[in-house]
């Protein structure tokens, strides 16, 4: 591996113009493809295998032509204090607004609240539901403007007008300000680390190029692969972070080799052969973690994971080819300013902050280990009360119309009104099928048409009776406020009705109610001969949370197991990979505990602009495990590979730990700070879910890099000594040798160097 990458680095250095032109051509090609590619169709969120999804699919099958996935807007009208919306003037204003809302080319219907009896008992609040013919992502700017204009005109009447629904929501995604903040902080960290504008700018430039290629490729492939508009968010976040980090490690190793007196071409080749090997294996761990998201069984999450894995692969290729090419263009510009002025490069000091910290840990490994483990364990304790869900409008800021509409509906109609359950009754199997058979038997004695009409009438009667019984029983369940009249399909064999709980959508009591209704199903189905399923956004969120929880352990087993095998090959040690995996579990559990403390329990939530606490986003644990595991293994590979390199070259275990920290501590700290900056930038977004993801990822990187990798890892290695690098002889023979330490390269580099090539001489002059 090291020798192959050495040749790649030397080739990229010598053929730098070709490499740069190839990447420019790739960027131009995918960019052109992205511009010409049709937009991705909004396929909606699907979760195969759960009851809510089965019920939704049944509705689409039995109610053809219904816009089940069409955008909706729920417009709420609140009369001034002391007045009612049913008053003549207010009623006229409401009806005029509904008429304006219905006047749109993409509007399917706008329901008058007075005709639909959508008025609160106190008469002060009413709502109108606007249904569109297309999905939310397909709404035109004209339709959105027409909605906003109608609402603004209605507010002039003195009524309080708020709106929620998918037509009002903007698709959550990473805003430009988040990336700008992350890049700005990363630039400062790189400048402090390297002391050179060129050295700081090169990782940023190559990372942005890699993200450009990845995002353009995702856009170009969005239509044929069915990628949604949110697929690229994770790819952009990770592509930027790892792209900077991987280039950072190669440039840092290049400067180290130049300090040993190497020519630019040789230093570049050695940097790619050694640091590049660590980049490849670190990238593989990230790809494994992201590709492993396929085991969860959520199509959207699978696509996001694979797209982000592709972005990481691009980042690795950029670090191995474009970075050494740029070093060929500016071989001296990336050096420290004082080294360029002096005309010679000083080797890194034998004693720096990394070595001093390593010696501190080596002198007292047990107290450091205990303190680190106990501290992370204490942070992880709140995770035991983790409640999963999908925060909705109730989690938005009170400055948004969606949140104010949510509050107005909860006040006027009760907290459960914002999350009604949808019950789908299927009476086809035991009613229609049986009557079809009866019709065939009676056809010999009666006219065929008459028999068919009789059977249909009987089937409709039986279906209505079954639906009536199920509706009445569910309505009598404790915790149910009301049940809407059932709506039948044209065939008369399937019905849909809504159930309004007495508690809020995210309440545990609502979850218990869904469980209770489903537990009553066997008795109701045996008594009526019809089957039913519970769906709706509230039930869907409950089912998603349960599926994610059940998938978390298999996902951990797959990802951690594959990564341990990979690290066995890299470090040729049995205990180091196990220690790496256990350390990761500590950090991810601690970060989940921190998320619970802030976003569920509300401690310090106001500092982040979080106005309402509640359940943690269902996908958060999967996101956190998948992304942070890959990044944690990055730091493990970069830091411990230098220790392994020193140990292989004859140093004692303690000396190897010190050497690893001398060469890598500052770079790992810089890489972690960059990751934290990129992720923390997303905490400034208004969307609560993106805030949560940004906070969770930033805190996980902080804990893993500074507590696990910088404290617990050296403490464990100090306590284990030579045993840390022990590998059974039989396993040593089985595992392939990849020489990630670059031992063969080091031996070759220590021999007298050949005369410099014209390309090297030209690079030095630059």
Image (tube, helix red, strand yellow):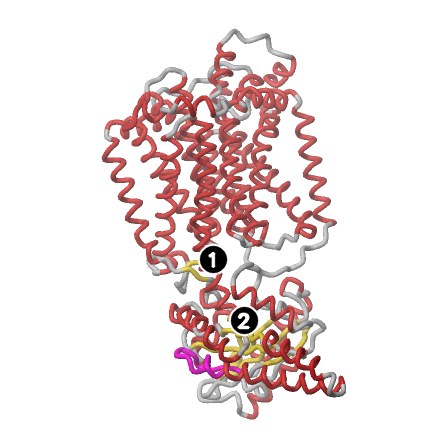
Question: What is the quadrant of residue 368 in the picture?
Answer: top left
Q: Which stretch is magenta?
A: 472-484
Tell me, for residue 122, which label it has, or none: none
Other residues around mark 1 within 10 Å, as few (<14) / some (14–19) / many (≥20): some
Other residues around mark 2 within 10 Å, as few (<14) / some (14–19) / many (≥20): many
Q: Secondary structure at mark 1?
A: helix
Quadrant (top left, top right, bottom left, bottom right) of the N terminus:
top right
Tell me, for residue 164, which label it has, or none: 2
- Give 740 or 239, whichever is nearer the viewer: 740
* Residue 524 point in image, percent of width and height: 48, 77
- Give 325 or 290, whichever is nearer the viewer: 290
Residue 409 at least partly seen: no
- At a point 57% along the width and 54% down the height, the residue shown is 300
CA gap, disc 1 to disc 2? 28 Å
Rendered position, 62 above or below 663: below
**Which residue, given by chain and number where applicable, does mark 1 sit on?**
547
Rendered position, 286 above or below 551: above
Quadrant (top left, top right, bottom left, bottom right) of the C terminus:
top right
Does residue 480 show up magenta in the picture?
Answer: yes
């Amino acid at each position: 591996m090291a020798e192959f990458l050495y040749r790649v680095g030397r080739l990229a250095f010598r053929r730098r113009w070709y490499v740069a032109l190839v990447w420019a051509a790739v960027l131009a090609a995918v960019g052109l493809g992205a511009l010409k590619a049709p937009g991705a169709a909004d396929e909606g969120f699907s979760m195969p295998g759960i009851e809510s999804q089965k019920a939704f699919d049944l509705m689409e099958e039995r109610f053809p032509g219904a816009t089940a996935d069409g955008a909706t807007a729920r417009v709420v009208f609140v009369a001034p204090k002391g007045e009612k919306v049913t008053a003549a003037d207010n009623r006229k204003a409401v009806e005029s607004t509904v008429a304006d809302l219905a006047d749109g080319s993409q509007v399917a219907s706008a329901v008058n609240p007075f005709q639909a009896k959508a008025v609160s008992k106190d008469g002060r609040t009413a709502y109108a539901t606007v249904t569109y013919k297309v999905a939310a992502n397909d709404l035109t700017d004209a339709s959105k403007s027409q909605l906003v204009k109608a609402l603004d005109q209605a507010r002039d009447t003195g009524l309080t007008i708020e709106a929620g629904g998918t037509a009002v929501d903007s698709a959550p995604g990473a805003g430009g300000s988040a990336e700008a903040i992350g890049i700005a902080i990363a630039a400062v960290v790189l400048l402090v680390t390297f002391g050179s504008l060129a050295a700081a700018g090169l990782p940023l430039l190559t990372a942005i190029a890699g993200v450009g290629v990845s995002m353009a490729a995702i856009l170009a492939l969005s239509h044929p692969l069915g990628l949604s508009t949110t697929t690229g968010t994770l790819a952009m976040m990770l592509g930027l972070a790892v792209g900077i980090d991987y280039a950072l490690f190669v440039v840092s190793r290049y400067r180290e080799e130049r300090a040993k007196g190497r020519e630019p071409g040789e230093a570049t080749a050695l940097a790619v052969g050694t640091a590049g090997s660590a980049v490849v294996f670190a990238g593989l761990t990230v790809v494994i973690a992201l590709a492993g998201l396929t085991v969860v069984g959520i199509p959207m999450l699978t696509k996001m994971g694979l797209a982000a894995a592709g972005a990481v692969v691009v980042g690795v290729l950029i670090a191995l080819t474009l970075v050494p090419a740029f070093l060929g263009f500016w071989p001296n510009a990336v050096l420290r300013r004082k080294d360029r002025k002096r005309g010679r490069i000083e080797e890194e000091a034998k004693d720096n902050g990394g070595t001093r910290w390593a010696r501190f840990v080596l002198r007292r490994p047990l107290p450091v280990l205990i303190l680190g483990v106990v501290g992370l364990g204490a942070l992880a304790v709140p995770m035991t009360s983790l409640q999963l869900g999908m925060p909705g409008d109730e989690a938005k800021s009170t400055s948004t119309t969606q949140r104010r509409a949510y509050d107005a509906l909860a006040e006027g109609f009760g907290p459960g009104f914002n999350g009604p359950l949808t019950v789908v009754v299927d009476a086809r199997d035991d009613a229609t099928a049986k009557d079809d058979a009866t019709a065939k038997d009676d056809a010999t004695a009666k006219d065929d048409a008459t028999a068919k009409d009789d059977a249909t009438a009987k089937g409709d009667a039986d279906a209505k009776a079954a639906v009536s019984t199920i509706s009445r029983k569910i309505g009598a369940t404790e915790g149910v406020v009301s049940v809407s009249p059932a709506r039948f399909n044209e065939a008369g064999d399937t019905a849909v009705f809504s159930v309004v709980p007495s508690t809020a959508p995210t309440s545990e009591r609502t979850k218990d109610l869904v469980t209770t209704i489903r537990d009553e199903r066997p008795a109701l189905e045996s008594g009526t001969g019809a089957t039913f399923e519970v769906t709706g956004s509230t039930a869907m969120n409950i089912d998603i949370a349960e599926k994610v929880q059940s998938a978390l352990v298999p996902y951990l087993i797959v990802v951690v197991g594959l990564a341990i095998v990979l690290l066995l090959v890299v470090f040729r040690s049995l205990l180091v990979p196990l220690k790496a995996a256990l350390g990761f579990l500590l950090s991810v559990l601690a970060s989940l505990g921190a998320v619970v403390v802030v976003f569920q329990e509300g401690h310090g939530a106001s500092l982040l602009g979080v106005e309402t606490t509640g359940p943690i986003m269902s996908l958060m644990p999967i996101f956190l495990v998948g992304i942070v595991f890959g990044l944690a293994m990055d730091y493990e590979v970069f830091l411990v590979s230098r220790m392994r390199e020193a140990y292989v070259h004859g140093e004692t275990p303690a000396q190897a730990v010190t050497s690893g920290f001398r060469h890598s501590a500052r770079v790992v700290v810089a890489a972690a700070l960059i990751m934290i900056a990129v992720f923390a930038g997303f905490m400034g977004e208004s969307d609560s879910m993106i805030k949560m993801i940004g906070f969770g990822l930033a805190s996980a990187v902080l804990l893993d890099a500074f507590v696990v990798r910088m404290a617990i890892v050296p403490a464990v290695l100090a306590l284990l000594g030579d045993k840390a690098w022990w590998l059974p002889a039989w396993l040593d023979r089985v595992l392939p040798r990849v020489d990630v330490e670059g031992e063969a390269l080091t031996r070759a580099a220590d021999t007298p160097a050949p005369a410099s090539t014209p390309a090297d001489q030209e690079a030095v002059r630059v």
